Image (cartoon, rainbow, N blue to C red):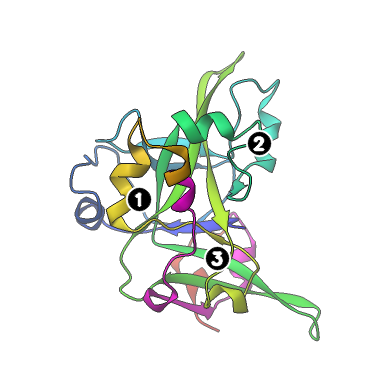
Amino acid sequence: MCGRFALTAKTNEIEKLLPDTKVTIDLKPRFNIAPTQQIAAVLNTKPNEISLVRWGLIPSWAKDSSIGYKMINARAVGIDEKPSFKYPLKKKRCLILADAFYEWKPLPVEKRKQPYLIKMKTGEPFVFAGLWDTWNDPDNGIINSATIITTEPNELMSEIHSRMPVILPEENFVYWLAVDSATDKLLSLLKPFNSDKMEAFPISTKINNPAYDFEDCQERE
């Protein structure tokens, strides 16, 4: 799964990754993004700008927003058949911006979990494949929310966890956002990213606290 991630990239780095997208909002560095918080995404209905959406998908048909807590991730297997995800897969896809994510490796002997930071070796930002939807909150109006798609781990991640987020290579951005993309081709994109381009290292357990949003939560152990 993917339960925490970071986005600390500067505007020029994001514009390099997404040259056709306008960065019109203030993206302050965030080292510990947690579920239910606002995340930066490019929606397929607004492919040339960055939007802020709530992390944790709330389907349009949901009775209340609490379902979003259970939908921060969407497993790639069977995603085109599950009620919460099959419509967004066809009509509401997005790119979710990040430059690192975190995972916890079980240490049975020590009876604890060791947090790891995973990022590109270059340190550059990247995008997760995401789905989004719109829910009408009776009290607060329209809420746009999103989920990160996960798949089986690559060689690097298999040493840490049984799943990893789907990271899309740049050549697939346009197809993922295109309104007329075929479902079978979309499903073929939901695969592990090249582990040779990634690195992982253990970090401080300060990351366990979602309120802790300082750079030194990324300190190597």
Residue 132 on image: x %, y %? 49, 34
Q: Please report the residue visible at 45 percent of the width from the left and 49 percent of the height from the top.
A: 129
What residue does disc 1 label?
A: 28
What range is drawn magenta here? 186-211
Residue 30 magenta: no
Helix, strand or loop for disc 2: loop
**Residue 31 at least partly seen:** no
Q: Is residue 129 above or below residue 32?
A: above
Q: Amino acid at mark 3?
A: Tyr
Mark 1 residue crowding within 10 angstroms, few (<14) / some (14–19) / many (20+): few
How far is mark 3 from mark 2, CA to CA?
A: 26 Å
Q: Residue at x 69, y 33 (%)?
A: 67
Quarter residue 91 falls in: top left
- Of circles 1 and 3, the one toward us is 3
Picture disc at residue 82: 2
Amino acid type for the residue under numbered disc 1: Lys
**How far apart are the two marked residues, 2 and 1, measured between alpha carbons?**
35 Å
Q: In the rendering, which numbered label is found on residue 102?
A: 3
Residues packed near mark 3 inside 10 Å, few (<14), some (14 to 19) or many (20 plus): many
Give the spatial CA distance, label 1 vs label 3.
Answer: 19 Å
Residue 102 image point, x, y percent: 55, 65
N-terminal label among 3 and 2? 2
Which circle's residue, 2 or 1, is located before the other in the chain? 1
Inspect the image, locate mark 2, and give the three-letter code of the amino acid beneath it.
Answer: Lys
Label 1 SS: loop
